[in-house]
Amino acid sequence: MADPVLTFTEKGIFCPAGGFYIDPHRKVDRALVTHGHSDHARPGMGAYLTTHAALPVIRHRLGRIAAEGIAWGEPRRIGGATVSFHPAGHVPGSAQIRVEVAGEVWVVSGDYKTEDDGFAEAFEPVAAHGFVTECTFGLPVYRWQPQAQVTGDLLTWWQGLAEQRRPALVAAWSFGKAQRLIAALAGLAPLPGPILTHPAVEAVNRVLRTQGYPLPDTLALDQARPEDFAGALILHPPSAQGGPWADRLADAETALASGWAAVGRHRQGRGAMRGFALSDHADWPGLNAAIRATGATRVVTVHGYTGVFARWLRDQGYDAAAGDHTPPRDEAD
Amino acid sequence: MLTLAALIRDLDADRTLSAREAALSRHFAAMAPQDRLRTAALLLGRRPRRIASAGELGAWAAAAAGLPDWLFDLCRAETGDLAEAAAQVLPPPASDAGPVPSLAEVLSGLARLSGAPEAERHAFALALWGRLPVEARHTFNRLTTGGFRLTLPPGLIARALARLSNADPATLALRLAGDWDAGTADPASFAAPGEEALAPAPFPPEPPLAVPVEALGPATAWRVEPADGPRAQLVTGTNGAALWSETGEPLDPAPLAALVRALPPGSVLGGRLAPGGRFRPTDLPRLAGARIAPGDQGPRLAALIAGLPAGLPILPVPVPLTAWIDLPALAGPGGAVLHPVAGIGPRHLWTPPPRLLTAALIYGHAAPGTGFATLSFGLPDPATAEFLPVAQIPPGLPQAGMAEIAAWIRAHTVERFGPVRLVPPERMFELAFDGVAPAPRRKAGFVLLNPRLVRALPQAVARDATPLAAIAALIRREG
């Protein structure tokens, strides 16, 4: 019997025919990388292959690496496998990776979301025999509202604070979520105040602007004057500790912009007063729809509620199993 | 229902009294007057009877969402809240679902269906789920299962309502705290002025003293009032009386009925509710309808009390101090309030310097999120060498320190009791506390007053712990 197209090893998802790993979590010679988040693009690989669109952020984060970009949909022969990269809709440049070996097609989703956020390249279903799906939010309680509604709610909240000259402090992932929010809010102008960004967010903004992603100008926190804070929306990574600007935020209201905000105890556990359930991952209906759209009969679940989601998929008639050796779910979203 | 759900979201977001009052007022403004009273009733704890058990609601939601029981159970575990899980597993209302139900429709449905056959209750829940957005569905689910538990004090609700009209907040608060029915109450007469206002006067500030008492000059310039209970004001009228807390909440004046009868109507007597149902007067801002200037209140109060019949539940007014060294003995558990003898000028709240002890960490109480909500500390019982709990307090250590302790607790858990983890008494901490009170039902026999975590003592070991007897002795010494 021939080798499977993909195997799930301690180092990550491996393609024996092509001799490469996808989003490996240990050092390997050849890595195909879906996107620039740190639990997918890790340092220390011999060579990286990723989309042209994802490469600048990966270089920004990993420094000097041997990396090559590839166009959307461009087939590339690697050993006995043919690979191509297709938009995953997660963050700018994020890809699903299609792997074909001897006529059998598998798609590794990376992280993905099915709603078009108007900023990242929109998710495209790719026909496959087998689908490796993330399931960060693979429980039926996770159902997102349309982006327009969530950003509208966020704007209303910000306007209320701006009228009181108070800052609105939003925890959002520094690559992806923050820029998506900035772009979506820009579409709702006029805004009640300036958008200030944590230096980690602003650094990614600069990279994406250089690439040509349509991001309006934002002001880094460390460049802001004291009067800029009243009525401002401030975007910072969830892990950010106070900086020299912390005392200007004493009367801020805090919010979490994340899929985790959909559940009250997760929002409270992250210390936010408000939650805006805006996720860059697929929700429960999105996961199920994406799997259906591939036409795949075999599904491997990774990242998240892998066992639960695989059991559900088996109940639905899929040949589904949890991928072994997957690292803990992405808490970042 | 939408406004009620949004109100609850805002009440949860910022729990300070001022933010809650502002949120109430903002959302009341968006409601019809009758809905304001319906909402007020819910927030005062006057809730409809539940129409579904937890089991029924879960079964209805799982079936409506097409989920197997095992998967719905996981959803319930994920949210830790049945009402939330049941609200979120269902798709949003269809665009042609019909109008979002009003609060009145929901409440009348709940009232009508209490005790009805399951089929009717089930049909009602399904019909409303189909018309309610997720957030409002969550609130609805809490009402259907009796899980709506948020309550607010009547004074706070009254202040928010009063912002919308020219009603007197004190009159409103007393009406809200009284006997009324949200279904039949008339909003107009609710907000109408009363026959007489029983409003409190402003409470004179008692800020904590920031300097040593000696900086206040000679002790003889001050009188001492033990801080041994909450501040309150007793307001008398011709047809009744009101007792107000410092935060503007109506309290039950019945225990002070004899005092009320002895006071002239139209008086405001300020003071402190001391232990034993007694009142210690300190202020007399109004007497028989006449306002009294601060400087005159001392003598007028003394004269009033001298003329009162014997046997009333009142304690003597603050006593003059002769020397600063006497202050600790005259203080109550919360310290002492220093009043200027002249009756004019600022007061100060003096609190005794904290006492310190060395205790061992013995339990961690896991929080729903990640870390530990509270930690329990114990002192050794010499007879058994067992560490008996004396304080359960929030961690309050810098983030990094707490993360290390949380990891240590997880790694050294001896036994688990639900969310509580027992650990060996190996990690020592310095605690501060203001006093001790006897507590016969506690293993230690006492509780620490206002205990707080000062610092970790990484070098200390179990035998460095303060002996239990040393703390117990404080009770005997201080009575």
Image: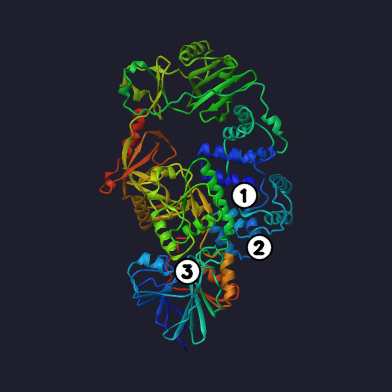
Task: Characterize the local packing of mark 3: few (<14), some (14-19) or many (20 or more) Cα atoms within 10 angstroms.
Answer: many
* Label 1 environment density (alpha carbons within 10 Å; few <14, some 14–19, many ≥20): many
Q: Where does label 3 land, which residue? A: A94
Answer yes or no: is residue A277 visible.
Answer: no
- Coloring basis for residues: rainbow
Q: Is residue B35 above or below residue A207?
A: above
Which is nearer the eye, A307 or A296?
A296
Q: Quick check: A125 above or below A239?
A: below
Q: Identify the subunit bearing mark 2.
A: B
Identify residue for label 1: B139
**Amino acid residing under circle 1:** Thr
Residue B273 seen in this snapshot: yes
- The answer to which of marks 1 and 2 sits earlier in the sequence is 2
Q: Percent position (x, y) of residue B408?
A: 35, 55
Q: Residue at x 49, y 19 (%)?
A: B283
Task: Quadrant for residue B41, please give it.
Answer: top right
Q: Quadrant of residue B117?
A: bottom right
Task: Report the disc number at residue B63.
Answer: 2
Judged by depth in the image, the label closer to the viewer, 3 or 2, is 3
Where is residue B391? Give x, y as percent: 39, 42
Which chain does the numbered disc 3 sit on? A
Residue type highlighted by circle 2: Ala
Q: Is residue B387 left or right of residue A216?
A: left
